[in-house]
């Protein structure tokens, strides 16, 4: 048996602070058209794909922070992306900063959505493992203020039926945590879509800088193999506002093998025909969770 979903991992090169949403959406639409020409069903964009990676700056005024957030999806700037994807018959996954009124207050999340080929939002995920720090740390060459600008996601790690398969999402730092994949693995996920913005330099541990690409691949390949799922990791890459970001956009099979990988740090579409049934031999053997897991010994993992 085979169930093929052809995926385009739509790496974006740097987005300048001065670049408008409309300009970024034009770049994304170019990706959609290339994807269509290559026979894709699904296009995956990076984390916070509509703007520069703003948590690198400390901003005191809420108004300035909120300018990076979307109040509606689609909104006036993103409507052309939805329209073109629908016209081309492409599903897509989009990461963006979400501002919403919920539980009687204004809330900020680092969000990803899955949009089907008809242009309907069929899945939403809000980032759970927020990295970085909450206070201004002027000693750093640049900030990583995700813990200040976002709340921890409140939707768990759901898995959605779409495109004839089971899809999950996670965002950037989430990929470093085995629990992320396992919670979706326990829901029989078949493809995990994930975007990232990873600076080459990590100010609190510069000795790790040389390992950024290695750890990126290591965690995604391990998550794929250990949960018998495809993983599509998509970077915002290159030198963005003076901060070099790793690329390494790649599509990883349930075998743990990378089947396609970016060769630039610019806008680049990486494509692969992914058989969702490829995970089955693992799900029926070494990772048959019902037969081989020993959850009675895993309690420590969920203790705080
Ligand atoms: N965006 C994001 O989550 N980036 C983190 C940087 C970690 S260093 C603070 C990542 O895990 O790649």
Image (cartoon, rainbow, N blue to C red):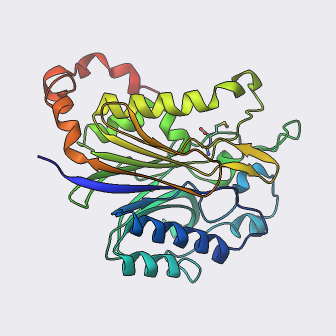
* Residue with the most extreme top position: 297
Q: Say above or below: 296 vs 222.
A: above
Q: Is residue 41 left or right of residue 83?
A: left
Q: In the rendering, at what x and y percent does residue 234 appear?
A: 52, 49
Q: Which quarter of the frame holds ligand 1?
A: top right
Q: Is residue 104 visible?
A: no
- Give 19 or 87, whichever is nearer the viewer: 87
Q: Quadrant of residue 288?
A: top left
Q: Position of residue 238 (x, y in %)?
A: 70, 48
Task: Decide which of 264, 87 is in the foreground and name it.
Answer: 264
The residue lying at 67 percent from left, 64 percent from top is 51
In the displayed structure, does residue 2 sit left or right of residue 296?
A: left
Give the residue at x 80% y 54%.
Answer: 241
Question: Which residue is most to the front?
Answer: 37
Count of numbered labels shown in the rendering? 0
Q: What percent of the width, then of the height, locates residue 182?
A: 33, 34
Left or right, 276 with reference to 195: left
Q: Residue at x 23, y 42 (%)?
A: 188
Q: Residue at x 42, y 31 (%)?
A: 221
Position of residue 149 in the picture relative to residue 78 (left or right): right
Q: Is residue 146 visible?
A: yes
Residue 231, compared with residue 160, is above or below; it is above
- Find residue 174 and report its horizontal and vertical position in percent: 50, 40
Q: Is residue 61 placed above or below 235 in the rendered structure?
A: below
């Amino acid at each position: 048996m085979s169930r093929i979903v052809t995926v385009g991992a739509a790496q974006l090169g740097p987005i300048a602070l001065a670049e408008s949403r409309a300009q970024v959406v034009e770049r994304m639409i170019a990706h959609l058209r290339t994807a269509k020409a290559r026979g894709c069903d699904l296009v995956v964009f990076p984390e916070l794909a509509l703007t520069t990676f703003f948590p690198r700056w400390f901003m005191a005024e809420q108004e300035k922070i909120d300018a990076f957030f979307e109040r509606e999806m689609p909104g006036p700037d993103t409507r052309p992306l939805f329209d073109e994807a629908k016209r081309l018959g492409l599903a897509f996954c989009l990461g963006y900063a979400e501002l919403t009124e919920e539980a009687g207050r204004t809330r900020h999340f680092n969000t990803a959505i899955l949009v089907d080929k008809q242009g309907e939002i069929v899945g939403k995920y809000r980032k759970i493992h927020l990295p970085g720090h909450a206070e201004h740390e002027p000693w750093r060459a640049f900030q990583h203020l995700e813990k200040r600008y976002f709340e921890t996601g409140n939707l768990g790690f759901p898995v959605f039926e779409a495109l004839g398969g089971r899809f999950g999402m996670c965002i950037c730092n989430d990929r470093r945590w085995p629990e992320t994949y396992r919670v979706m693995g326990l829901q029989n996920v078949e493809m995990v879509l994930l975007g990232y913005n990873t600076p080459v330099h990590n100010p609190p541990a510069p000795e790790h800088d040389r390992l950024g690409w290695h750890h990126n691949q290591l965690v995604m390949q391990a998550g794929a193999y250990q949960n018998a799922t495809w993983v599509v990791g998509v970077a915002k890459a290159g030198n963005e506002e003076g901060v070099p970001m790793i690329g390494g956009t790649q599509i990883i099979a349930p075998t743990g093998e990378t089947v396609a990988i970016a060769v630039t740090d610019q806008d680049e579409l990486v494509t692969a025909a992914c058989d969702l049934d490829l995970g089955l031999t693992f799900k029926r053997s070494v990772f048959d969770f019902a037969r081989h897991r020993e959850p009675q010994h895993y309690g420590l993992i969920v203790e705080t």
